[in-house]
Structure formats: C-alpha cells, structure tokens
Amino acid sequence: MITVKFLREDKEESIKYKENFKIDDVLKIFGYSSETAVVQRNGKINTEEETVKDNDEILIIPVVSGG
Amino acid sequence: MYCKCGKKAIIFRRYSGEKLCERCFNKSMIDRVKKVIRKYSLIEKNDRVCVAVSGGKDSLVLLHILKKLSEKYPFDLIALTIDEGIEGYRDKAIETVKRNCELLGIESRVYSFKKELGYPLDEIVKKDRELSSCSYCGVFRRYLLNKKTRELGCNKLAVGHNLDDEVQTILMNFLRGDLSRFGRTGPYYIYLNERFVPRIKPLREIPEKENVVYALSNNIEVEFSTCPYSGEAYRNNIREFLNKMELEQPTTKYSLLRSYDKIYSLLAKSLAKKLKYCEKCGEPTIGNVCKTCEFLEEL
C-alpha cells in the first residue's frame, strides 16, 4: 500500500501499490499534476518521474498558496 | 532520474529538459534571479530595497535570495509587511515573517489597514460594497506598500511575483481588453515619479512551483495556507488553462512572457500614463483622486 497525505489537510488516503507506478500517476489520481503540486516521498522532494515503491509515504504539497 | 553532476534529481524542468539535484537547483535559482536583476538593472549599488513580505512562499524565497545577494553586493534590505486584518491567517503569517527576519538579521516593519486606513479587511468584507474584497485589499495594500517604502527612505520595492503570476496577469488583461493594465506588467518602468517607488520583480522568471521547491529544500519556514477571501474566479480559470497548456506544451509560460517582454518596449510608451498626484492625499495616481481615497469614501 502507498500512503498519501496532503499538506494543510487533515486527511490520509491509501492506494494499492502497482508495479511501475510513478509519482505522476499518484498525482493524477488526486486531481493534481506536475504543474500544480510538489511531492515529498518519505520526507524527501522527488520528481514526478520517480517510480513509487510499496509502503512509500507520499506528501502532496499544492503549488498555489497565499493569495 | 539523475542530475548532470550524478546526484539524484529533485526537480525535472520539463520546459528545458534539465534534471537538477538539490545543490544544482539552488545554484540555478540564485543565478536566474541575478540574471533578471542584471538584465533590467533592478538593483543598483547602495540601493535601499524594501521587500514586501507576506509570509507566503514567494515573498520569503525572495527575501532569502536577496539576503544572500546582499552579502556580496552593496545594497540594504528591509522587510515590509502589510497586516490587512485577516484573523487566523495574516496574524499567523506575520509571526512567520518575524521569525525569518530574526534568522536573517533583517529589520522587519509591519503596518496595518486598521491603524493606517481605519478598517481591517475582516470589517471591509462585511460592509455593503460594490467590488470584491480582493479589489479593496489590492488597492489598499499597494497604496501602503508604496507610501511606507518611500517613508522608510527606500528607493526600490521588491515584490515576490513569480512567472505564473506574471503570465496570468498578462493574459487576463489581454483577454479583458484592459490595455492600460496590459501595458503595466513589464519588467521596468517607462515613466518614473518621485512619489512612486519603482516596484521590482526579481522572481518574475521563476515558476511558482520552483519557489515551493526552493522553500522546502532550504527549510525556509513559510505559510502554505490560502487567504480565506481569495478566489478571483477569472484568475483561477486562466491559471488552470495555462497549467493545462504547459503540460501539453512545456514552454508555454516562458513563451508568453518572452512575447510580452518583446512587445512591452513598443506598447508601454503608448499605453503607460504619466502619474499625477491625488487631490486628497497627495499620493501618486492616474486620475485626479486615487483609488484608495475613492474606496475609503465609499466605505
């Protein structure tokens, strides 16, 4: 399983691990893209092209804030 | 995915094909800001620069980068924060600004809508008004930023506008047919006025996303929250459109900025208006009475 957390939101989702699953695929599931979010995988900033491993923890940080 | 230096990449710039590790990315950010500053002579020797710092990622990234540059080049920095009076949002951000300024050894000044103009934004939104709260907030904020920068003896006002902000504004004004505003998004000023401090935008070529990555990779404490009153529907639509286009054609935002910058020198002279002084408060304005005085009368 992959745990997905969202900055500023008190929610946590779990998605089933798939082989060759990229961070970009995880973003798409939750309506984000490489333009709208930055991702930390297990606490470190990763490119969207990285492949996700089973039991990874993904934190989605939306690009837009302030206003 | 690896950087050209062999380390693991933290960012993939689809628009240039570069894959950069943390160190190379940070160096590249500083180099790009320096390049913009040099290209348009945004900061010159012995300038006193006020940085408009809200506590969000863009303005704090700007403050941290300018601090780094000021250690090598002779110019002074002051952080200027406007407290619009948004409970639970700006008060938290002001504390974040103060902690960053202490860390960097930069003087921090805070001025509030309530004390300077009579009303906090929380009160303005409850009033019977014609325009959106963002319209009042924007006019009042720009008015105070200019006035206070001048009163603090600074000759430049640095703002954290990023590439996304710039291209959204350019496209919004163009699509609305607002050519007067369209001629005002450039990197430099055609007409200067002694009471109008030039606003400089050293981050105008940095994508918003890269400011987030810079803040995270340098452990800069920033407020990632969103203003409770924000929600300019038109800007949100334009942002969505540009992000979609950038995914399909990953140079869209830069191309738009480059096109604009090329025509700016031709456009600005015919579109920019010389500033006059407000009949009521004496601050610079395009009309006879400035928008701040007009709005305060209405409220």
Image (cartoon, rainbow, N blue to C red):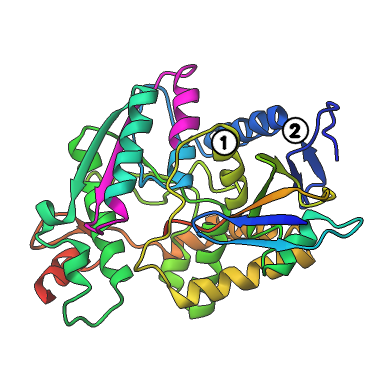
**Residue marked by disc 1:** B33
Tell me if residue B156 can be seen: no
Residue A44 in the image: x percent, y percent? 68, 38
Residue A28 in the image: x percent, y percent? 74, 66
Q: Nearer the viewer, residue B211 or B224?
A: B224
Q: The magenta stretch spans which residues? A: B63-90
* Of labels 1 and 2, the one closer to you: 2
**Chain letter behind tag 2:** B
Residue B134 in the image: x percent, y percent? 33, 68
- Above or below, B251 against B46 in this view is below
**Residue marked by disc 2:** B21
Q: Earlier in the sequence, mark 1 or mark 2?
A: 2
Q: Is residue B282 left or right of residue B221?
A: left
Residue at the spot x=85%, y=35% of the render?
A: B2
Secondary structure beneath dot 2 equals loop
Q: Nearer the viewer, residue A51 or B264?
A: A51
Q: Amino acid at mark 1?
A: Val
Would you say residue B79 sits in the magenta stretch?
A: yes
